[in-house]
Image: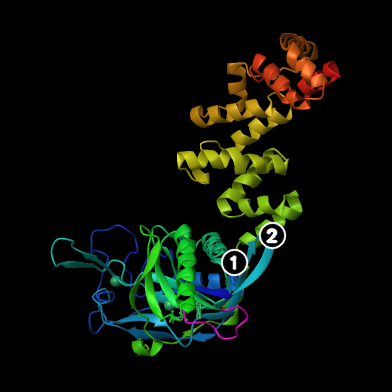
Amino acid sequence: MFESVIGLEVHAQLKTRTKIFCGCSTVFGAPPNTHTCPVCLGMPGVLPVLNKKVVDYTLKMAVATHCTVNHKSRFARKNYFYPDLPKGYQISQYELPIAEHGHIHIELDGRKKRIGITRIHMEEDAGKLTHDTHRPVSRVDLNRAGVPLMEIVSEPDMHTPEEAGAYLRHLRAIVRYLDVSDGNLEEGSFRCDANVSIMPTGADTLGTRTELKNLNSFKHVEKAIAFEVSRQKEILLEGGKVIQETRLWDPAKNRTFSMRGKEDAHDYRYFPDPDLLPLVIDDEWVASTRKSLPELPEQKKTRFIESYGLPPYDAGVLSTSRELADFFEACVKLFPKPKPVSNWIMGPLQGLLNTTGKSITGSPVSHAALAGLLKLEDDGVVSNKIAKTVFDEMAVSGDSAKSIVEKKGLVQVTDVSAIAEIVDTVLGRNPKEVEAFKNGKTKLMGFFVGQVMRETRGKADPKIVNQLLNKKLS
Ligand code: ADP
Ligand code: MG
Ligand code: ZN
């Protein structure tokens, strides 16, 4: 039997206004080569100047992921020749990164697991090439050259595609909580390479790894890893050898294919960049960064469990983003029953956001509007079922729950004698079912309740309906 081993390298584009070593704008979508200058174009005789914000942001991430910050780190030149890189080298960090030896936790099926972070370092992005499909022509856009990236390298601590997915999701939640990166896989501001190998279960040396690229959604990451694991198993079972290489994920064919042999570090001829001074970070800088950190996803989840009494699952879902968590808390402030609020957010509201393609900050139903609806439900003015109808109406018209209920006459019927009359009518109309019920077919209760609710267009208080039916049928 085999065990799979997975380590991820993540490149997060940092949300700075300007590039890492020059003052050019990082704004996306400008006409090609308009956000360039002699520094990011690699002209001779110009010098890079490190953007302090890049260090600030990376430091936040380092502290948030429990890394040891190196008081002295260094930039290095990673040499390679390709038209997306006019200098002929990428400025990165190599033997002395800004931070090392961190970790985050993932949680799967209620079990926590620690995933090590080997290192975090800063580097510059390269330009973008577009290749003409009809002619042998390629174009170079250097707007992206010099855009700051933070690379986060994990230990090979993951063993299933699901673990890799959970790690990546948590990492993304952290960069978003810190507001240092958009964390968007689809748009490329959060890029992941997955390193995958397999080894006989219990072996103490890792197998040969392949590196998977072109993974631009969580689904692709998980599918590509699963494919790669089974591909490698097949090779080993047939007596073959996995070769170390870089492979591309093909989402259309659901497979990976070889792109190039994997280069080793020595191929890049790394050496310290003589144009940049070593970066010195003192204790005070680290301490003030630590103080500036917001509450992070894991802490928020714990607090939601402890102070609102939410089940861990709910707390986990609600703390996936700061905005969602804020929405929940704002709603609970107005309607202090956390579990119903959580149910409504995870259920109808999430459904609404999915179908309308809106984010929580642009939710068609505000936290105050939702609290208003929940109050009506809680006061027994509307049943849960009617509340759902009112919710849909609120999403469309933007009206308050109260005014919709009034306008449409949806107030719940709680008048016992009125409901009793309808119950009698329903029972009178269905003598066969009543007979069967009395002979033990108790499942028919649902049928009777449904009939009464239909008669009242869903407005009868289900509690009273049930009580009356129980009484009259016993
Ligand atoms: P490179 O740049 O050469 O890919 P890095 O050190 O940046 O090297 O990244 C190596 C990544 O591969 C890390 O995430 C590490 O955990 C992972 N890794 C290393 N060896 C293995 C292996 N045998 N199987 C799976 N993942 C591995
Ligand atoms: Mg790599
Ligand atoms: Zn520039």
In-image side of 144 versus 471 (left or right): left
What predominant SS class does the magenta segment belong to?
A: loop
Toward the viewer: 55 or 349? 349
Asked if disc 2 is less than 8 Å from ligand 1, the answer is no
Toward the viewer: 279 or 138? 138
Badge 1 marks a residue whose secondary structure is helix
Q: What residue type is labelled 2?
A: Gly
- On the image, the x and y values in percent for residue 306 come to 75, 55
In-image side of 350 versus 277 (left or right): right
Badge 2 marks a residue whose secondary structure is loop
Q: Which residue is drawn at 61% across and 35% down?
A: 370
Q: Residue at x 42, y 71 (%)?
A: 212
Quadrant assignment, res 295: bottom right
Q: Name the residue under label 2.
A: 110
- On the image, the x and y values in percent for residue 25 come to 33, 64
Q: Which residue is drawn at 53% across and 45% down?
A: 360
Toward the viewer: 16 or 8? 8
Q: Which of marks 2 and 1 is in front?
A: 2
Quadrant assignment, res 437: top right
State which region is magenta. 200-209
Q: Name the residue under label 1.
A: 292
Whole-number angstrom distance, CA of label 2 to CA of label 1: 30 Å
| Residue 334 visible in the displayed image | yes
| Residue 151 visible in the displayed image | no
- On the image, the x and y values in percent for residue 98 come to 50, 80
Quadrant assignment, res 250: bottom left
Toward the viewer: 62 or 448? 448
Q: What residue type is labelled 1?
A: Ser
